[in-house]
Image (tube, rainbow, N blue to C red):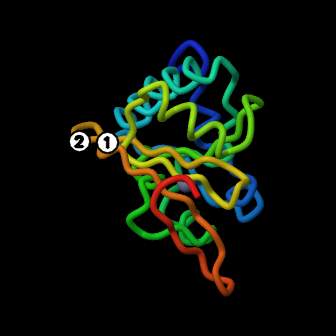
Amino acid sequence: MKLTEHFKLDEFTYSLTASRLKIDNSIPAALMPNIQLTAIKLELVRKALEHPIIITSGYRCPALNARVGGVASSAHTQGLAVDFRSPFGTPKQICQRLIDAGVVFDKLIQEHNQWVHIGFSPTHNRQIVLTAVKNGGKTVYLNGLA
Ligand SMILES: [Zn+2]
């Protein structure tokens, strides 16, 4: 099912962990408006990067989210966040470009220099920018692009 010009529903539900563990990661009807909003926002991200986006983690049902170690309040469980990579460049270059282009987001996280997390709010986008790094085996979030 096509959501927007460049994004399909499958891209938001696909999870290797979910298929391996036989977790049903399909999206509840009540969250479809959130997924649709996220897809629309991701078109703007794609436009700013002028490159495709590869979603590595989109929607996570609570069971899947727990298995991948996500915090219970994760925007992924609301269908309002994705993790992605892009041939545009490194996670830091991607984040910098999105900031410079004035893309609206609630939270943008450069994750361990491996992927980008972007989250949106239907009502109040806070433009929070963080960098996730490991510190003594634990993930800590630094303000801004470190
Ligand atoms: Zn994420």
Q: Which residue lies furthest to the bottom in this view?
A: 136
Q: Residue 121 carries which label?
A: 1
Q: What secondary structure is marked by label 2?
A: loop
Whether residue 6 is situated above or below residue 110 in the rendered picture: above
Q: What secondary structure is marked by label 1?
A: loop
Whether residue 5 is situated above or below residue 99 in the rendered picture: above
The answer to which of 114 and 27 lies nearer the viewer is 114
Query: How far apart are the two marked residues, 1 and 2, measured between alpha carbons?
Result: 6 Å
Relative horizontal placement of residue 124, taking residue 66 as reference (left or right): left
The answer to which of 127 and 1 lies nearer the viewer is 127
**In the rendered structure, which amino acid carries the disc numbered 1?**
Ser
Whether residue 138 is situated above or below residue 57 in the rendered picture: below
| Residue at the spot of label 2 | 124
Question: Marks 1 and 2: CB-CB under 8 Å?
Answer: yes
Could you say where residue 29 lies in the image, as x and y percent from the top left?
Answer: 38, 39
Could you say where residue 84 lies in the image, as x and y percent from the top left?
Answer: 65, 42
Residue at 53% in and 67% down: 70
Residue at 41% in and 27% down: 102
Asked whether mark 1 lies closer than 8 Å to ligand 1, one says: no
Residue at 35% in and 44% down: 127
Q: Residue furthest left?
A: 123
Q: In which quarter of the image is ligand 1?
A: bottom right
**In the rendered structure, which amino acid carries the disc numbered 2?**
His
Q: Quadrant of the C terminus?
A: bottom right
Q: Which residue lies furthest to the top in this view?
A: 5
